[in-house]
Image: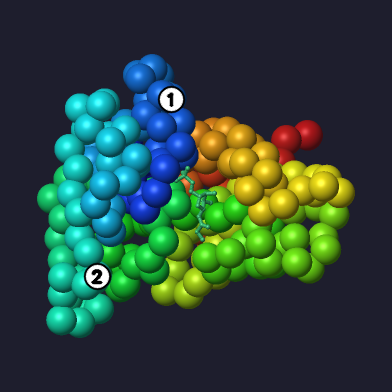
């Protein structure tokens, strides 16, 4: 069974999900702590949040490498230096390559109920489709775009007047809670993956009478 005490969190923007993890891990009983924060761009609030919390940061930009494969290897090496038990892609707008995915479990958070509306515009696509309920998904990343095994989901109703920004903010309130709860449980209880089924905790499958 895998455990998740040391977290490397990857961000590309405002980093409110990162902040929720930083706040939760201030309590040692949470079971996990952020040991480093990585990004694919400079000057973002996510990195500033890490610096204010005295967490080391690193930046690897795709454009700084001749090929995507070289970026994949470079970011995997930066992550590996912090010996994480779990990598959390929290609003990181890049697909990680096999050097990272083969070395570490990667948890990803997405602002829609997968498998509906994967990709970079999950909130916009759900609104455009006219769904009445959307939400957020925490999944283990694989090499696809939001296709990995689902760990946890939560629903958020769509209101008639919602635009993308308003709906996304309402999803993010739920998403932060779900991510913090899921990472904490994975850290404290461990998890197993069987096919597409992720189980947190030590479920033996035995029945009591
Ligand atoms: C979150 O809603 C996250 O699910 C989304 O970006 C936001 C980041 O917010 N990620 C994706 O859409 C990835 N497909 P944050 O920077 O405030 O944590």
Q: Could you tell me which secondary element the residue under label 2 belongs to?
A: helix
Q: Quadrant of residue 74?
A: bottom left
Q: Residues within 10 Å of mark 1 (few under 14, many from 20)?
A: some
Residue drawn at point x = 77 percent, y = 48 percent? 162
State the separation of the CA atoms marked 1 and 2: 31 Å
Residue drawn at point x = 58 percent, y = 64 percent? 121
Res 108 visible: yes
Res 198 visible: no
Q: Of the residues tagged 1 and 2, which is closer to the observer?
A: 2
Residue drawn at point x = 56 percent, y = 55 percent? 110
Find disc 1 in the rendering and name its residue. Answer: 24
Vertical placement of residue 89 versus 49, above or below: below
Q: Could you tell me which secondary element the residue under label 1 belongs to?
A: helix
Query: Is the residue indicated by label 1 positioned so its CB lies within 8 Å of ligand 1?
Result: no
Taking the image as shown, residue 24 lies to the left or right of residue 52, namely: right
Residue furthest bottom as drawn: 67
Taking depth in this image into account, of 36 and 15 the one nearest to the observer is 15
Query: Is the residue indicated by label 2 positioned so its CB lies within 8 Å of ligand 1?
Result: no
Vertical placement of residue 206 versus 60, above or below: above
């Amino acid at each position: 069974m895998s455990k998740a005490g040391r977290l490397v969190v990857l961000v590309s923007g405002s980093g409110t999900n990162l902040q929720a993890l930083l706040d939760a891990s201030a309590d040692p009983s949470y079971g996990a702590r952020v040991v480093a924060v990585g990004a694919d761009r400079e000057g973002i609030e996510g990195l500033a949040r890490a610096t204010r919390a005295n967490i080391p940061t690193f930046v690897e930009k795709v454009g700084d490498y001749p090929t995507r494969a070289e970026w994949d290897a470079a970011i995997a090496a930066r992550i590996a230096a912090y010996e994480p038990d779990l990598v959390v892609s929290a609003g990181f707008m890049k697909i990680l390559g096999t050097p990272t995915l083969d070395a570490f479990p990667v948890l990803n958070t997405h602002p829609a109920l997968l498998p509906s509306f994967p990709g970079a515009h999950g909130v916009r696509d759900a609104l455009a489709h006219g769904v009445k309920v959307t939400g957020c998904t925490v999944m283990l990343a694989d090499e696809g775009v939001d296709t990995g095994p689902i760990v946890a989901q939560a629903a958020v109703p769509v209101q008639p007047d919602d635009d993308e920004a308003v709906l996304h903010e309402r999803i993010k309130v739920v998403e932060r809670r779900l991510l913090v709860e899921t990472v904490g449980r994975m850290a404290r209880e461990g998890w197993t993956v069987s096919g597409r089924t992720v189980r947190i905790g030590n479920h033996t499958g035995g029945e009591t009478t």
